[in-house]
């Protein structure tokens, strides 16, 4: 398949409406979209990514009025969260309407819905005029793409088009919140923190072991975010650092590594991490040391991605 690179939201939307898969920029990471109500089109996302079919997709919308086509029984606290965080990096998991095909939700009785804030994403979704199912636009298991060049690396020749925009602002995926119970429960940490959610709904909480056992967010069990180099989460580097090793973290960078990225704060670390993983591949880095950080605010989402990237590369080698 020839992949069209375009800066026109209109052209990209037309190709998507014709049943194609189209990658587009959002404030979290780039997404790979297809018409959410067209099961055949959505299946093409799974094929292009090599994505396991038990991993549900998030449905993206341009306007809040579209929620009622996708979901039913929306609790009052979910509406409060929409008021506070939409448009933005928050996905709400709601009881699904029968119009949503099984392939989108991996057979679950819920659907994840998000209204992105990125202006190009918004223009594209408005041009499409219908909900767009879209996971991250990477080959399954790889680091999420935060630039259109990263999408080209993973999906060129496998998708109908790539809508080019600038680097994604947040750099990590959306926060996924289960809104089917009495209070919101975070299924996946992301761009909106628990502390921010609690300012709006004080009962909001992170998922417990029990929630995880019940498998409320099935995608979490798959290998994720792993570059070709080995990822090591650490506070201290071996001296001397091994050949072809790299480091990313906050503040002064350690000596001895061949490639490094020193970030000024947590936000910048989150923004840079997936980009850095891919830059390491281009430089033939074999081992990436990632500084561990305290588990509050955005630190929760970033540590989640780093841990899973490290586990993913360990598994590749194990
Ligand atoms: P991605 O956009 O590639 O990060 O993938 C979407 C992720 O959203 C999945 O891996 C799940 O963790 C989550 N998700 C989407 N829909 C649902 C749902 N109905 N219930 C629980 N989690 C969901
Ligand atoms: Mg993903």
Image (spheres, grey):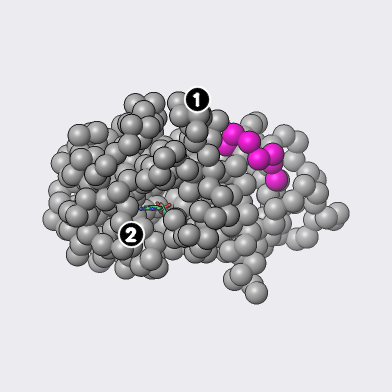
Q: Is mark 2 within 8 Å of ligand 1?
A: yes
Where the C terminus falls, by quadrant?
bottom right
Residue 199, disc: 1
Main SS class of the magenta portion in the image: loop
Mark 1, other Cα within 10 Å: few <14 / some 14–19 / many ≥20: few
Position above or below: 51 against 80: below
Res. 151 in view:
no
Residue under label 2, please give it.
108
Determine the residue positioned at 22% across, 50% down.
Answer: 97
Determine the residue positioned at 32% across, 68% down.
Answer: 47
- Could you tell me residue 312's position as x and y percent? 58, 64
Task: Judge left or right: residue 138 versus residue 252.
Answer: left
Determine the secondary structure under disc 1.
helix
Q: Is mark 1 within 8 Å of ligand 1?
A: no
The segment highlighted magenta reads 292-298
- Could you tell me residue 290's position as x and y percent? 68, 49
Mark 2, other Cα within 10 Å: few <14 / some 14–19 / many ≥20: some
């Amino acid at each position: 398949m020839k992949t069209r690179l375009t800066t026109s939201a209109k052209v990209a939307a037309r190709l998507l409406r014709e049943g194609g898969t189209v990658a587009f920029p959002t404030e979290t990471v780039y997404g790979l979209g297809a018409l959410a109500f067209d099961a055949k089109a959505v299946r093409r996302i799974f094929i292009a990514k090599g994505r396991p079919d038990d991993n549900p997709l998030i449905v993206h919308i341009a306007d809040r009025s579209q929620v009622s086509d996708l979901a039913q029984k929306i609790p009052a606290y979910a509406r409060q969260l929409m008021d506070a965080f939409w448009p933005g990096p928050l996905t709400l998991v709601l009881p699904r309407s029968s119009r949503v095909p099984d392939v989108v939700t991996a057979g679950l009785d819920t659907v994840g819905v998000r209204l992105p804030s990125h202006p190009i994403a918004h223009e594209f979704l408005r041009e499409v005029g219908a909900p767009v199912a879209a996971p991250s636009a990477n080959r399954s298991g790889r680091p999420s793409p935060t630039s259109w060049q990263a999408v080209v690396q993973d999906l060129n020749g496998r998708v109908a088009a790539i809508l080019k925009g600038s680097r994604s602002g947040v750099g990590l995926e959306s926060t996924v919140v289960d809104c089917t119970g009495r209070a919101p429960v975070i299924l996946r940490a992301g761009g909106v923190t628990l502390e921010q959610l609690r300012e709006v709904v004080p009962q909001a909480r992170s998922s417990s072991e029990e929630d995880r056992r019940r498998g409320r967010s099935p995608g979490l069990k798959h290998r994720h975010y792993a570059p070709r180099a080995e990822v090591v989460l650490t506070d201290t580097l071996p001296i001397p650092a091994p050949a072809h090793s790299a480091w990313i973290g906050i503040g002064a960078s350690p000596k001895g590594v061949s490639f490094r990225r020193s970030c000024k704060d947590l936000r910048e670390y989150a923004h840079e991490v997936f980009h850095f993983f891919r830059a390491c591949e281009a430089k033939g880095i074999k081992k990436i040391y990632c500084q561990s950080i305290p588990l509050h605010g955005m630190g929760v989402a970033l540590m989640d991605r780093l841990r899973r990237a490290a586990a993913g590369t360990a598994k590749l080698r194990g």
